[in-house]
Each structure stands twice: as structure tokens, then as C-alpha cells.
Amino acid sequence: MPSETLKEQVIRISGVNPLKCMRCGKCSGSCPSYEDMEYHPHQFAYMVEKGEIEKLMNSDSIYKCLTCFACVERCPRNVEPAKLVEAVRLVKIRQQGANHLKAESIPEKLDAELPQQAIVSAFRKYSK
Amino acid sequence: MKISYYPGCTLKTKAKELDRYGRESAKALGVELEELENWQCCGGVYPTGKDEIATKLSSVRTLENAKKNGGKLVTLCSACHNVLKQVNEEIKTNEDFAFRANNYSKFDEEYHGETEVIHYLEMLRDTVGFDEIKKKVVKPFKGVKIGAYYGCLLLRPSKVMQMDNPENPKIIEDFIRAIGGEPVIYPYRNECCGGYVTMEDKNIAVKKSSAIMESAGSFGADLMVTACPLCLYNLTQNGGGSVPVKYFTELLAEALGVKEED
Ligand code: SF4
Ligand code: SF4
Ligand code: SF4
Ligand code: SF4
């Protein structure tokens, strides 16, 4: 079997069909992380379709998504851009040594009030 | 009446009050929340990857356990609720996932999403009834302007969560009325607080949470309520702290007269 391209991996993992996107931009307009992302949710749809996965993988944008599902809720075409962001991040962090959150970095991020939930969630999103 | 209950890890540690006031209030309302045995942490956020199996198995075990214990499961933390409900939907609708999860888990009887997952607020609305609550309130929050903070995970994605209208919800406002308070509707009540991104980029959580606090404050809220320990953290620690934030169960316990002062 020929090895899967990055684009094929992202599409398989996300279950998203980026061709459904009509580029209305509603997802990005709803995204609370918009100003902190280099590439915005609608660009994930567009760039995945064009196969520009590496650019996305190497951008910090994949760590800025809050998984708030606003883009999923508001997309008129049911594209579910959050799932593309997550799939690109998974392709990235599943690589050898590519965990984004390292256990050693946790102590300095802790404060007395931080709930366990924040740590568990961050590990789930940023490391494999 | 007994209903199975999933507290989740944070309610056993940082958010003990959310749990304790929730149980005491339920008891006062005639519902006994029976904690599931041997539950495990759900992981805090729903993994959307189609090929993620292992990260969803603890939720599948919880759901299957609840199926054997009455078939209904009450959750309280918004995050647990979101994860359990989305995994339940996935095992109901995604055959491949259902096959693999069952194959791995080897339950006596296969699990296909039979359990009904409801949030504590839905239990108040649909099982107890807000009118019943109103009758049992002994210390109403008269004249207190309370802002409901939904955040993101209670309502979205609405296709799966099916709790309330995701853009114009009212379940927490109805709750506030039931305990005698005055709900304050403000624009940011269903915007995300920044969630776990506080671990990655605190600045994002500060911006998001401050905007929510300012929005609530400028619409006149004296107090805000939430169902999520991480929302509470972000709003109080990253949001500037201009308005006090409490768990809705604490207010409920107080209104019902079952809040012990400690
Ligand atoms: S909202 Fe949907 S259709 Fe519109 S740009 Fe975003 S992904 Fe494409
Ligand atoms: S889920 Fe992520 S990409 Fe989508 S709106 Fe929320 S933060 Fe933005
Ligand atoms: S969602 Fe959070 S609080 Fe709930 S069990 Fe999972 S990690 Fe713990
Ligand atoms: S509002 Fe914040 S903490 Fe609450 S559910 Fe959303 S991201 Fe999580």
C-alpha cells in the first residue's frame, strides 16, 4: 500500500470533507482565538483541500484552538473546521518526539487554584 | 428516586463544593445521586479524531456501567458532561468505533449508547421541575442580579448536547428565577473563557475571560454562576475578578437552606 499523504491522513482522522466549504468565513468570524491564530478555521478548510498541510502543522495556530465548537455550531455547511484543526495537530504530535506539552514544564505552570481538569485537558490536546 | 452520578476528577479535588452542594441539594429535592463505582477520569476534552479509540474508552466504561445501573447518568462538570455525551453519541452512530470499543472492552453485553446522559441542570428542569424547586426555596436570592455563564461545552455542539438553544439559552436563567434571583442576560454568556489554553498561552485566557467579566459587569450582574471548575478558574484568576463567580449548586444549596456554613 502506498503510504498515505498528509492530506489523506488529515481527512481520514477528521472525517471532514473540506470540499463542502463555501468559504463564507462564518467559522473564523465566530472563533474566539481568531486574533491569536496565524491560520484561521476557514483557512484550515481551504489549505487542507489544497494539500498545504505542512504549513499548518508548523504553525502555532494548532495549539491556539480552544475546542469551543463555535465553528462547528455556526458553519452553515456542516464542515466542522475544529476537527481539521485537531487532525492536523494529531498528525503533528504523533510524530516521534513531537509532544507539545512536556511533563517537565507542568510545575512552573501550576498555581494553587488550577483545577486538575486543565492539566488533564491540556495533555490530551497537546501530547499523545 | 435514585440516579447514577458521575462526579469526575476535579469535583473530587479542587471543586469539592460543586459536588457537595450538588448532592445535598439533590437530596433536599428528593433525588439520591448514586456515585458510579470505579469511574475513571474522562480526560477533560472530547477527542474529535476518528481514529482515537483509547482516549475514549474510560468514557465508554462509565456509560456502560451506568447502563447496568438504571440507564440514566447525571453529570455536573460541564466538561465531563460534554465528553461523556459526545462519546455516547459516537458509539451510537459510528459503527467502526462501536465495533472497536466493544471488541476491546468485552462487556457481557455490547454497548451501543443506550445510557441517557443528562446534566444536573437538565435533572432540575426535567426530573424535578423548576416550579417544584421554587416551592422548596426557603432563602430566595431576592433582588440579586445573577449572570449565567454557560461557556462553550454545556451547549455545543447543540446537535449532540441538545440541552438548550445554543445561541439563546435559558436553562440557567430559569434556574436563577427558581431560586428567587434576577437573571442578567449579557452578550458573552456563551462565549468561551479560554479553557485549557491557559496552560499554553495564558494571555488568550486572560483576554477571553476579561471580556466575559466586563460584559457581565456592564450589564449589571452582582454575581455570576457556572457549572464548570475550569470556567470558574479562568473567570476568577484570569478574568480580573470584578464580579464574584460561584457554582450554581452553591446557590441552590443556600436557597434550599441546606448549605452548611463551614
Ligand atoms: S463556516 Fe463552514 S462553509 Fe463557512 S468558511 Fe467556515 S468551514 Fe467553510
Ligand atoms: S473550536 Fe477552535 S477553531 Fe473552532 S471556533 Fe473554537 S477555538 Fe476556533
Ligand atoms: S472532565 Fe475534567 S473533571 Fe471531568 S473527569 Fe474529566 S478531567 Fe475530570
Ligand atoms: S467556557 Fe471555558 S472552561 Fe468552560 S467549558 Fe468552555 S472552555 Fe471550558
Image: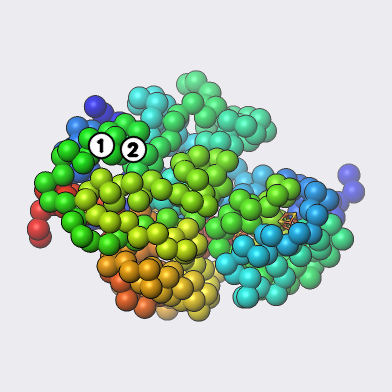
Which residue type does callout 2 highlight? Arg
Tell me: residue A124, above or below residue B97.
Answer: below
Tell me: residue B104, above or below residue B239.
Answer: above
Foreground pick, B16 / B58: B16
Number of labels in the image equals 2
Foreground pick, B3 / B42: B3
- Write the residue at 79% across / 59% down: A23
Read off the residue under disc 1.
B131
Q: Evaluate whether label 1 is on the same chain as label 2.
A: yes
Read off the residue under disc 2.
B125
Q: Residues within 10 Å of mark 2 (few under 14, many from 20)?
A: some
Q: Picture coordinates of residue B92 (x, y %)?
A: 58, 30
Element assignment for label 1: helix
Which chain is mark 1 on? B
Which chain is mark 2 on? B
Quarter of the image containing the C terminus of chain A?
bottom right
